[in-house]
Image (cartoon, helix red, strand yellow):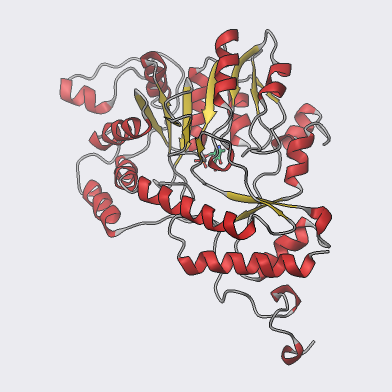
Amino acid sequence: MSATSVSPQALAINGGSPVRASFLPYGRQSIEESDIEAVVNVLRSDWLTTGPKVAEFEDAFAARVGAAHAVSFTSGTAALHGAAFAAGLKPGDEAITTPMTFAATANCVLYQGATPLFADVSRDTLNLDPEQVAEKISSRTRAILPVDFAGHPADLAAILKMARERGLIVIEDACHALGAEYQGKKVGSMADLTVFSFHPVKHITTGEGGMVTANDARLAETLRRFRSQGISTDARQRQSAGQWFYEMVLLGYNYRLPDFACVLGIEQLKRLDANLARRRAIAAEYTAAFRESPGVTVPAIRPDVKPAWHLYAIRLELEKLTADRAQIFRALRAENIGVNVHYIPVHLHPYYRERFGFSGGEFTAAEDAYGRLISLPMFHAMTGQDVKDVIAAVTKVLSTYSR
Ligand SMILES: Cc1ncc(COP(=O)(O)O)c(C=O)c1O
């Protein structure tokens, strides 16, 4: 086909002009001059790590999410590892989690030598279905790990009730949900342990970084020791006390988030409310545009929930379309829209298939959703034009492939 014979409506994948001239990623960080200045000041200070910015970030974070304690880690994954350790997971124990997540949620159970058991998700939110969890509980169960998929809080009331009745610990993976609210309470204040990530695509960033919040002081102390070699004091405490003595009291790791990352977190946290407001406005614009679109199911929002919109994941109604998800994904990428897919259900990864014998067909709600999901660009620095471009590209692609 020659360029001149291509209609303006032709998809870029078929030789038409893309909706955008430049690629729009699905997520990215926002860094301001004040962030850079704060980081540089720490680089010029005496403490690059284990210094004063660590507790300052942790205290500000705990206050923001309404938790008694917050303990920083080098990543969300390290924070999950800390939470699994603090929960006391050990070989022979089982922890129940969702397949509709990033593999790190289940991997942290394996790090402790315990066994993750998956339970299927609810079809509306794609969060852990409490009824499916109940069926998996046995005398070996020690923990439940719900994930707040895309930033929509899990069904915490049902999960916490079940856990309290059976003496189980709840580790909420809220890596998508900083700033989300559930029944008027902030995510981070409700579960025994709540885990956050500060990867650049998240609501705030420290480059890499993570946090665990807890209301129990003993859990928080265990987390602090675990992230610093299992040692009972830190270098700054020893320096200020003028002593050299320390003892290793448990088998820990070096998961300490340095001061220059913590100060970035402090600065970023000041903009969390603005970031959330922007994400909520983008989500509202997408939902208004696609609610009536044939071929698309927009994300569900349960009553009494304020999602944090880490992701905006549409589901394709493939029955109404002439193309499959892979084709629609490629067509949107060709329009320069950085769509993504969250998630390949964890049990379908080769490691989990080989180790636990999964072959597909075990968790039909998660697997059906996986075949339909497409994450649209969602980050707080998106401009009005970026949002319009996404809407235009999705509309163009879906109208081309609609039955
Ligand atoms: C649900 C979930 N859990 C855990 C993690 C791990 O966080 P990190 O990348 O900070 O290690 C992620 C990261 O994207 C995530 O999405």
In the image, residue 90 above or below residue 40: above
Q: Quadrant of ligand 1?
A: top right
**Is residue 257 something that shows in the picture?**
yes
In the image, residue 336 above or below residue 269: below
Residue in front for this viewpoint, 144 or 384: 384
Q: Locate residue 356 relative to residue 380 in the image: left or right.
A: right
The x, y position of residue 243, in whole percent, is 19, 19
Quadrant of the rendering where the N terminus is positioned: bottom right
Tell me which residue sits at (36%, 46%) in the image.
273
Tell me which residue sits at (57%, 43%) in the image.
150
Residue in front for this viewpoint, 204 or 314: 314
The image quadrant of residue 66 is top left
Quadrant of the rendering where the C terminus is positioned: bottom right
The x, y position of residue 197, in whole percent, is 47, 39
Tell me which residue sits at (55%, 25%) in the image.
156
Residue in front for this viewpoint, 7 or 115: 7
